Image (cartoon, grey):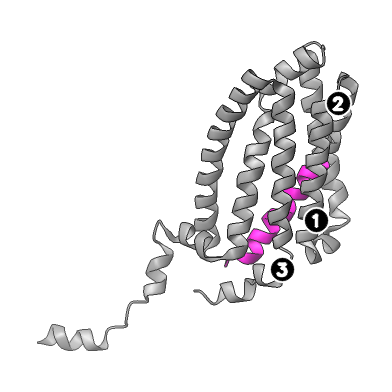
Amino acid sequence: MIGRRLERFAPAHDKSDSDKGHWLTGWRFIRDVRTVRLVVTLDVLMGVASAVWIAAIMLPFVVEELGAGERWWGYINAAYMLGSIAGSVLLLSFANRMNSQLPRWIVVGMLGAGGVTLCFGSSTHPLLALFFSFVLGPLYQMLLISKQTVLQQAAATDRLPYVMSAKGAIDSAVFGFSALAMGGIAEWLGTRTAYFLSAGFLCFAAVFAWRLRQPSAAPPLKVEQME
């Protein structure tokens, strides 16, 4: 009897708090929030497109298509890293402008990366490939920074770890599948075809990035009320 009476005065358990710790929390959030779902879709398409930069594809491209030595594979990788560093420093000066127009920067970055990837795959001289690799660095940094900012603005702070965990699982699965698929395409149809296909995926991703420009696609204030 005493136990039953005490239950009447015990604080009710908040179901929403228990849901936050559920292992499906991140997956449900991705499914229910349109902005997050679009960002994850972009990551999937970018993951497929980025598989062409693995050594199993890039090294044969350098040796067979460019007719250069293996050391040029290292030079081209280094050029991309230098471009990424330079791009990150340059984007700091545009931080405020980027924050107010993130979807536009993502669209520009997608189309730019697609165009440069196409040019890279069409190159016939290692110096041209080196240049395009350098240019690709800032474009990818623009994409990564903008997408990450949109995701953080769309997800409440206490739910962000669950969303990032679910997104990480998706990214890992996409990378494994894409590396296998792109490797097969490069083996059967040639490495140039793989780069052309990668450029196509990036341009197609720009369609989804354009949908982020719609006001209904980014409702961070509503997301905060889901606690």
Give whichever of 58, 78 is nearer the camera: 58
Q: How many marks?
A: 3
Which residue is label 2 attached to? 130
Would you call the spot at circle 1 few (<14 residues within 10 Å), some (14-19), or many (20 or more)? many
The image shows residue 103 at horizontal and vertical percentages of: 75, 60
Secondary element at image label 3: loop
Type of amino acid under label 3: Gln
Q: Which residues are magenta?
A: 137-157
Q: Would you say 3 lies left or right of 227 here? A: left
Q: Would you say 175 lies left or right of 98 here? A: left
Secondary element at image label 2: helix
- For the question of whether residue 146 can be seen, the reply is yes
Residue at point 41% right, 73% down? 16
Residue 173, placed above or below residue 157:
above
Which residue is label 3 attached to? 214
Tell me where residue 34 sits by quadrant: bottom right
